[in-house]
Image (tube, rainbow, N blue to C red):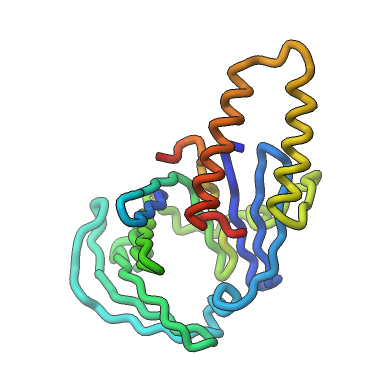
């Protein structure tokens, strides 16, 4: 469980949380503000507030206010790199007392492969996180009962489980 | 990319990769590298 992939598919009105280490995924319907994040359903106002350099890129610093279909305003500060076709190399948002910053490095302006937005074949779909964790923990418990299993692998799983728990508490995972 | 969050005095940094194709997004979080 050292990797989690969040895929958003507004065209299907779905999002996926994919756990490659478990060959499992959760499927969630996009509703409310997430669904209204589809560009056509939102209104966006951009105001230039300065010029700064981020990670060596000359940037226009903009205040961006997106108003979704429900009329809710989402405000961010965005640094658009003028040498990367205005790519937002840094995005800062504040929501419910929690600040979040995204810093992008090694930006490639190329179309990603289509399969990156699909679930790999052979993965098990779960209805919710509780069902997935219960099933997978039961599987792991059975495996750990087998003789010859290494202690280092057990401790890695426990550590990663704590990290997932921290992310769930902070609502950083999309379920 | 690195996602940093701060909630009061607690902060978390998660390294990862992001791919975007029009409205489709994919965010790979490296939980092992989380600080």
Nearer to me, A130 or A20: A130
Residue drawn 60% across and 76% down? Answer: A35
Picture layout, residue A44 above or below residue A90: below
Quadrant of the rendered image containing residue A174: bottom right
Quadrant of the rendered image containing residue A20: top right
Q: For the view shown, which residue lies furthest in the top direction? A: A148
- Give the side of residue A142 with respect to residue A98, left or right: right
The percent coordinates of residue B24 (x first, y second) are 59, 65
Residue drawn 40% across and 68% down? Answer: A96
Quadrant of the rendered image containing residue A134: top right
- Position of the C terminus of chain B, as image quadrant, is top left
The percent coordinates of residue B17 (x first, y second) are 49, 49
Nearer to me, A111 or A54: A54
Picture layout, residue A41 above or below residue A157: below
- Give the side of residue A82 with respect to residue A33, left or right: left
The percent coordinates of residue B31 (x first, y second) are 51, 40
- How many numbered circles does the render carry? 0
The percent coordinates of residue A28 (x first, y second) are 69, 64
Nearer to me, B19 or A141: A141
Residue drawn 32% across and 68% down? Answer: A78
Residue drawn 72% across and 53% down? Answer: A119
Picture layout, residue B22 above or below residue A166: below
């Amino acid at each position: 469980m050292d990797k989690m992939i969040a895929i958003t598919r507004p065209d299907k009105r779905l999002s996926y949380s994919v756990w490659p280490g478990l060959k499992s995924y959760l499927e969630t319907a996009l509703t409310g503000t997430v669904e209204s994040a589809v560009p056509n359903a939102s209104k966006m106002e951009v105001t230039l507030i300065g010029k700064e350099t981020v990670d060596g890129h000359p940037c226009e610093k903009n205040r961006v206010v997106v108003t979704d279909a429900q009329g809710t305003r989402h405000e961010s500060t965005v640094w658009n790199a003028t040498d990367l076709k205005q790519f937002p190399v840094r995005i800062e948002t504040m929501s419910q007392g929690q600040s979040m910053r995204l810093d992008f490095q090694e930006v490639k302006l190329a179309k990603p492969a289509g399969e990156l937005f699909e679930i790999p074949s052979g993965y098990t779909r779960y209805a919710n996180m509780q069902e997935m964790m219960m099933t997978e923990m039961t599987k792991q418990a059975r495996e750990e009962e087998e003789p010859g299993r290494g202690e280092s692998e057990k401790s890695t799983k426990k550590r990663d489980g704590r990290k997932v728990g921290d992310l769930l508490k902070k609502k950083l995972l999309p379920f | 990319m690195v996602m940093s969050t701060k909630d009061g005095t607690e902060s978390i940094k998660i390294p990862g990769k992001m791919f975007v194709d029009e409205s489709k997004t994919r965010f790979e979080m490296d939980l092992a590298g989380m600080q």
